[in-house]
Image (cartoon, rainbow, N blue to C red):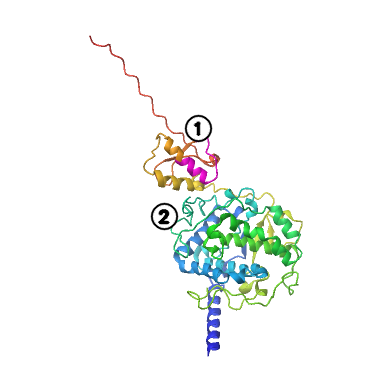
Amino acid sequence: EKEKNKMKLLLATAALVGAATACTPPSCTACPPRVRKAYSTLSCEERRLYQNAVKKLKQDRPAEYNRFVDTHVTENSFAHSGEKFYPWHRYYILGFENALRSLRGEYSCITIPFWDTESDSTDQWNSRPLRSTLWGRTIDPMSYCLQTGIPKAVSAGGFWTITDGTCLKRGYNPAFSFPGPWDVKLSVEQSFTYSTMLSATTGIHTGPHNYIGLNFKGSASPEEPLFWMHHANVDRIWALWQDYMGHDPTTPPLSSEYSGVLTQVMPFGAANAPGGPLPYYSPTITVQDVMYISNMPNGESYSYENDGVAALMTNSNWRWIVPKPAGTPYIDDCNTLPPYIEYEAFLERLTVFYNGQIKDGATVTAATRATVYYECSLLGNRPRADDEWIAMYGKGKDPIIYESCGAVRYLESIEEPTPPTPPTPPQREPTR
């Protein structure tokens, strides 16, 4: 009887997987082939679309988002056990992408962009996601709670909480770095077996986790929404290696292509987990089922586009990796936004302290300067000279005065008006 019940549960779960990932309008039948693009080359509209999809899933289905976190926690020992790391996370990320697509409407054909961290390796602090208002960067120096972006703390006017009900925390440990493009290139080119590649690419995976730190480290790291773009990048590195080495998805993988058991079933949440297993994962999925992104289950194959590392490599036979075309610009900032948006960290932190107190043309007092200098030091930048202070209007709030921390070129400088000098009253003769 127990076996019968178990079989019923598996069949029911399989039916849910079919319902969740089936290509029915307005979802994937009307969609073009899935293409995951580099975050660094996404247009402003593409960035906002993905940001809004993650936000909507977290806001509208918080329990479901938390189940993704719980799945990663529950299966941590399997998912991070040597050779299983790459295939387990490949299917895990695909499930989250399908969850975003299940929001329907404008999100029906969405794909997860990959955070090509090697393009930000020379300056992690100013990496494109971190300096964007979309994902935020500024943290509270006491609690480490994120203060800006979509995942900002409730205390900072946001909605994002992690599974224990507290804020999302980041630490930013400069002792860790992102491998650069040539590091990634050599890791791929010089790894002739799966085991070698797995070892050589460890830093690509762990660098961003350790640099951002706190909630981005450990088994509950999907609490941090940057997880999905980062692990799309990790998956892209595996696909890049497979493509470069000429692995053929039409033939059984060789031992050099995978060092584990290809027929091993991968677990994605126990049946008795809170809420049950997520409906985006098959209970019978094996390693071999997800070996190649060009041959994924349920017709959910995909490719990677604008790959800067592939553009450095001498391989003219790319199949599912598309090199970044020469001359393709990296998108640093969205020019359609008001200039202050990318530096919302300053605006939000300072308006919290001074909203309604600093007015246009106000005198910049020593106390004000000290606080702004403190804000800048949190971001690791040296305050600039007094003549580089600027005034900026922020989001319909009172004008505020703040120091730009090296970002003057992005900002519309507004000179603080100088009050007119009152005329000197005429001197009267003293009366005798």
Q: How many marks?
A: 2
Q: Quadrant of residue 222?
A: bottom right
Can residue 296 be seen in this snapshot? yes
**Residue 225 placed where, x, y %?**
53, 60
Give the class, few, some or many, for how many residues have Cα within 10 Å of label 1's Cα (few <14, many ≥20).
Answer: few
Q: For the residue labelled by badge 2, is the local secondary structure a helix, a strand or a loop?
A: helix
Q: Bounds of the magenta span?
A: 371-388
Q: Is residue 182 above or below residue 13?
A: above
Q: Secondary structure at mark 1?
A: helix
Q: Residue furthest left?
A: 432
Q: Is residue 416 above or below residue 421?
A: below
Return the residue at label 1: 387
In the rendered image, the quadrant that contains the C terminus is: top left
Percent position of residue 6, x then y: 54, 84
Q: Which residue is mark 2?
A: 155
Q: For this view, does 251 lie left or right of residue 121?
A: right
Camera-nearest residue between 84 and 56: 84
| Residue 156 picture location, percent across and down | 43, 53
Q: Is residue 92 above or below residue 131?
A: below
Around disc 2, counting alpha carbons within 10 Å, would you say few (fewer than 14), some (14 to 19), or many (20 or more)? few
Closest to the observer, 102 or 260: 260
Q: Residue furthest top?
A: 432
Residue that protrudes farthest toward the bottom in the picture: 1
**Between residues 245 and 366, which one lies in front from this camera angle?**
366
Q: What residue lies at 45% left-to-right and 41% top-to-bottom?
A: 371
Residue type, label 2: Ser
Q: Is residue 379 magenta?
A: yes
Residue 219 is labelled as none
Marks 2 and 1 in Cβ contact (< 8 Å): no
Residue 337 is at least partly visible in this image: no
Q: Is residue 61 magenta?
A: no
